[in-house]
Amino acid sequence: MHTSAAPTLVFPHTQPPEPGRLIEIAPGVRWFRLPLPYRLDHVNIYLIEDDDGWTVLDTGLDTDACRMAWKSILSGPMAGQRLTTMIVTHFHPDHVGLAGWLATYFGLPLSMPRPEYLYSLALQYAPGDLGAEMHRPFYRRHGLSQEVMDAVLSRGHEYLRRTTGVPTTYHRIQHGDSLRIGARAFQVITGGGHSLEQAMLNRPEERLFFAADQVIARISPNVSVHAMEPDLDALGIYLRSLLGLRESVAQDVLVLPGHGLPFYGLHERIGELMEHHEQRCAAIAEACRPKPLSVADIVPHIFHRELDEHQTGFAFGEVLAHVNHMLGLDQLMLESGRDGIDRYRAR
C-alpha cells in the first residue's frame, strides 16, 4: 500500500544506485538494488564490512535478473573482494530467495531468526501442506467468490518457488542479541506483523538502523492474516512493534530499509504508519455500518484500484488483519451467515 512520506523525512540520496553500481551509504556500508518482477520492483541489499570481507544483508529473489545483477556487482565494483557471511531478515522470497545459491556457490553461512528459518524450511520441504486446499475453506468463509478464488490460487507456489532454499544449518539470531560484524556490534531487534519475527539491526554508536521491511518511507508494509493462523491479530503485533521501535531506537538514526530510499525521520514515519492503519480501520468501520460485510466485500472499499491475482491475495490478507484487530478492540462484531460466510458489522 502506498502512502506519502512526510516533508520532515530527509533523504541523503534522492536516487537509488544504478543497476550494477554500489553506493557507500555510510563508512563500511554499501547499498545496491536487485530487480523484482512486481509492482514493488526492487529490493535493497546491504553489504557490511567484515574482518576480511563483507557480510551480505538479504539476498534477493531467485530469478535470472537477480542472479545476473549479483554477478555484475561481484565482477564489477566488488571484484577481488570476498563475501564472508549472510544475514537474512525474514522468509519472504525477495529477501531469502538466493540464500541457498549464495551458500552453495560462495560458501556463505546463514544467520536468521528461528521462526523465519523454520518457515522457509516448511515452504521448501512441504509446500503442498501450505497450498491451495488449506486456503479454499479460508477464502470461502470470508466471502471470496469461486472465480476470484480460482484466480488467486492459480498462481500456486509461483511466488514461493522463487527461492533456492536455505542451507541445512544456520546460526540463530534473536531479539536482544549483540551481533558482531567486523569491528561493529549491532543490537538485534525483531518485530512481527509484516513477517513472523523479522530481524532489524541497530548500531546506535553510528546512528545506523537496518529496518528491513518494518519501516519504509513511502509504502506501508503489507500486514496480512493467512490461512494457517486465521484469527491472528497481525496488525496489533505490528503496531506494538512500531511502538517498541519508537522507544528503543533513536530519532536521528539513518534508516536503511528493505525497499525505497534510506532516510532520516524514523519517529515521524512511525507516527505516519500508525495513523495510516487507524484511518484504514475507520474506513472499514464506515463500510460496515450500513450492513454487515465479508472481508471480500470490504476489499473494494479500501483498495480502489483494479487488483491482479497477486495483489488480490495481499489485499484480502491485509483487510482481514484489520478486521481481526478491530474485533479484538470490540469495534466490529461477527455475524456468521447460514451460507457459511462470516460478515462484520460496525458497533
Image: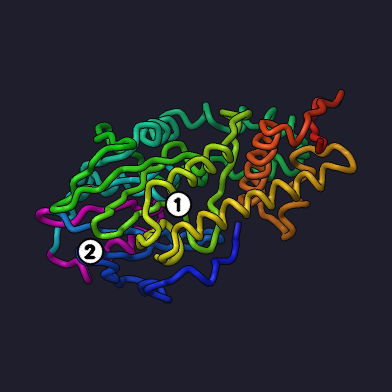
Tag 2 secondary structure: helix
Is 254 or 47 nearer to us in this picture? 254
Seen in the picture, residue 150 relative to 9 is either above or below; the reply is above
Instruction: Name the kind of residue labelled 1 in the image.
Output: Asp
State which mark lies toward you, 1 or 2: 1
Tag 1 secondary structure: loop
Specify whether residue 30 is painted magenta.
Answer: no
Query: Residue 196: horizontal and vertical position, in percent?
Result: 46, 36
Q: Is residue 185 left or right of residue 345?
A: left
Query: Residue 72: horizontal and vertical position, in percent?
Result: 28, 67
Residue 1 in view, yes or no: yes
Q: CA distance from mark 1 to mark 2?
A: 25 Å
Say which residue appears at 44% left-offset and 63% top-offset: 265
Q: Which residue is mark 2?
A: 74
| Mark 1: few/some/many CA within 10 Å (<14, 14-19, 20+) | many
Instruction: Name the kind of residue labelled 2 in the image.
Output: Leu
Query: Residue 131: horizontal and vertical position, in percent?
Result: 56, 32
Q: Quadrant of residue 347?
A: top right
Q: Residue furthest top?
A: 338
Seen in the picture, residue 7 relative to 44 is either above or below; the reply is below
Q: Which residue is mark 1?
A: 213
Q: Which residues are magenta?
A: 51-80
